[in-house]
Amino acid sequence: MDSINETALLDVLGRLESICPALAGAVVATRDGLVLAAVGDYQGDTPAACAASLSVHLQDDLQPLVAGPHAIGREELLIFGDDMLWYLSHLATGHLLLIGSRQTVHAGAVRLAGQTTARQLNRWLTASP
């Protein structure tokens, strides 16, 4: 596939239902909050805006921890809530992937689903048109 479009994004996001435990929803967005595709409960602009806000604020808030010779990557984050787990990944070309799971006990499975999806999306986002 030479370029990515909404149909291709929805196809990739649709596969998350089979690999991500208790999927609440997922969204691919630009860093300024423009929705490119969304599935599950994450329809509309709010999840994309939240992903963009998380990306900016966490980058600023974590900066003191990542400075210096032992810097850690911020390409992906797992964020735990009382009854939700969110996976946030920075994709190629300034895009974001946000996945929500209604279970917090399967963090490894959610992370693996996010990494698998992010790899697929990055291949398409970096492909030559």
Image (cartoon, rainbow, N blue to C red):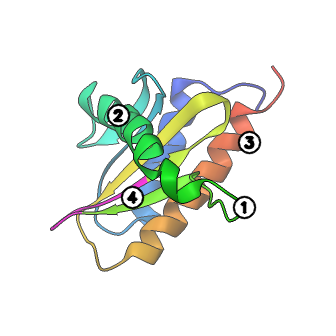
Label 4 packing within 10 angstroms: few (<14), some (14-19), many (20+): some
- Vertical comparison of 89 with 106: above or below: above
- Looking at the rendering, which quadrant does residue 123 occupy? top right
Q: Which tag, 2 or 3, sits closer to the chain's start?
A: 2
Dot 4 or dot 3: first in sequence order is 4
Residue farthest along the left direction in this orientation:
82
Residue holding disc 2: 53
Residue 102 x, y percent position in the rendering: 23, 64
Q: Quadrant of the N terminus?
A: top right
Calculate the distance from the C-alpha at mark 1 to the C-alpha at mark 3.
30 Å
- Which region of the structure is painted magenta? 81-87
Q: Which residue in the protein does label 4 denote?
A: 17
Residue 37: % across, % down:
43, 30
Which numbered disc covers residue 123? 3
- Quarter location, residue 128: top right
Q: Which residue type carries mark 3?
A: Arg
Q: Which circle marks residue 69 in the picture?
A: 1
- Give the mark toward the camera: 1 or 4: 1
Residue under the point 62% across and 61% down: 72
Instruction: Say which element carries label 4.
Output: helix
Labels 1 and 3: the sequence-earlier one: 1
Q: Residue at left 40%, top 32%?
A: 52
Residue at (69, 32) in percent of width and height: 125
Q: In terms of sequence position, does the residue under pointer 4 or pointer 2 come before the other?
A: 4
